[in-house]
Amino acid sequence: MLRWLLLLILIVPALEIGLFVWAGGYIGPWWLIFLIILTGVVGAWLAKQQGLDTINKARQSMAMGYAPQEEIFDGLCVIIGGVLLLTPGFVTDSVGLILLIPYTRRPIKQWMKKILQRMIHNGKFRIYRR
């Protein structure tokens, strides 16, 4: 897992810089700056809307006496997506947008659940109960 993270830390910034240079040459630097600011503002707004929606759903499920299982994964996706949308770059903005849209977030949540279940099964993640 650490290898993949290190690889992402090296590849994503290089890819973003390459896309910035290409897009800046294609549409111009001022339009590029405008797009970066626009995606940040839209990302913050969308993250706020989805975050409030997730909090409301969690409150409703807790009011009915259920643990907010799906809402926890939704919240993680919204937080990660919001941070990625606030980070300048086209690749990070695309991934952040995918994480913030509920319909595209569903397969990612399933993938996160499988990873968590595998970690619990292998003993790399433990849940302590009283």
Image: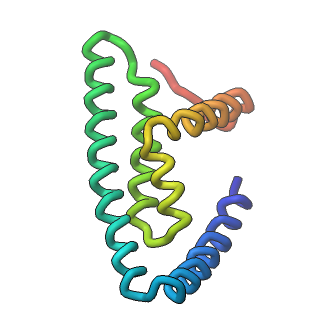
The residue that appears at 53% across and 80% down in the rendered structure is 23
Q: Position of residue 95 (x, y in %)?
A: 53, 55
Q: Residue at x 27, y 19 (%)?
A: 60
- Pinpoint residue 53: horizontal percent, then vertical percent: 29, 34
In the rendered image, the vertical position of residue 67 relative to residue 49, given as above or below? above
Figure check: 102 above or below 99: above
Furthest residue in direction front, as rendered: 27
Q: Residue at x 51, y 68 (%)?
A: 90
Q: Is residue 31 above or below residue 38?
A: below
In the rendered view, how is the structure colored? Answer: rainbow
Q: Is residue 38 left or right of residue 6?
A: left
Q: Is residue 106 left or right of residue 121?
A: left
Relative placement, left or right, of 19 versus 119 is: left
Depth check: give the residue in front, 98 or 58. 98
Q: Quadrant of residue 130?
A: top left
Closest to the observer: 48 or 102? Answer: 102
Residue 5 in percent (x, y) is at 65, 60
Above or below, 13 relative to 124? below
- Report the residue that reaches farthest toward the top: 64
**What residue is shown at x 74% (from left), y 32% (from top)?**
122
